[in-house]
Image (cartoon, rainbow, N blue to C red):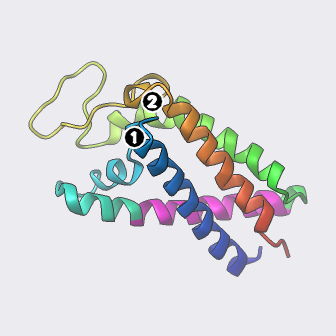
């Protein structure tokens, strides 16, 4: 595995993914703020949560980039379209399975069956994360597909 390449392009792809989700939020396509949601798992300070969440999200992006690199190395294909397909599959997993399970592990997120409490104030994602807007699943799947496409296009296998 080419560690320098995966560190560089994993960082770049994660920045682009995060930028795309923030752009979708700015265009009113979604209300999801991934760094904020992740950050509030670690701190109650809403301002600090964005910074902490961005740092954790970047580390997660690197970890997933390593998984992508291992996959590219083992199947001997590293192209933008193959990475894009893997990214889209990951995006589908995020909206279908990961985000709906989040209320079960997030200390500050209500569930679909329990209302707000003093310590749980974040809205749950709901089915396909549509509680954050009808276009949320589309925005997240596209952002993850772009993440994968960047890794597939620029990762240099050894």
Q: Nearer the viewer, mark 1 or mark 2?
A: 1
Q: Nearer the viewer, residue 124 or 24?
A: 24
What SS does tag 2 mark?
Answer: helix
Q: Is residue 136 above or below residue 108?
A: above
Task: Name the spot of residue 99 as percent of width and height, x first.
Answer: 45, 36
Q: Nearer the viewer, residue 87 or 74?
A: 87
Q: Quadrant of residue 119?
A: top left
What secondary structure is the magenta-colored segment mainly?
Answer: helix
**Residues under labels 1 and 2: Cα distance?**
8 Å
Bounds of the magenta segment: 55-73
The answer to whether 108 appears left or right of 21 in the picture is left
Q: Is residue 30 above or below residue 150?
A: above
Residue 119 painted magenta: no
Number of marks in the rendered image: 2
Question: Which residue is under mark 1?
Answer: 32
Task: Name the spot of residue 103 as percent of width and height, x first.
Answer: 33, 34
Position of the N terminus, as image quadrant, is bottom right
């Amino acid at each position: 595995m080419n560690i320098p390449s995966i560190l560089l392009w994993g960082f770049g792809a994660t920045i682009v993914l995060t930028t795309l989700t923030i752009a979708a939020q700015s265009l009113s396509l979604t209300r999801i703020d991934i760094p904020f949601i992740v950050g509030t798992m670690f701190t109650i300070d809403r301002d600090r949560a964005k910074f902490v969440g961005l740092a954790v999200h970047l580390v997660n992006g690197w970890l997933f980039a390593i998984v992508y690199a291992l996959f590219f190395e083992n199947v001997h294909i590293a192209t933008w379209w193959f990475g894009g397909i893997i990214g889209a599959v990951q995006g589908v997993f995020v909206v279908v399975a990961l985000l709906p399970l989040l209320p079960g592990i997030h200390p500050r997120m209500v569930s679909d069956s329990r209302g707000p409490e003093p310590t749980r104030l974040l809205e749950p994602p709901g089915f396909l994360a549509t509680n954050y807007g009808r276009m949320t699943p589309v925005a997240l799947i596209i952002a993850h597909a772009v993440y994968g496409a960047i890794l597939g296009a620029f990762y240099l296998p050894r």
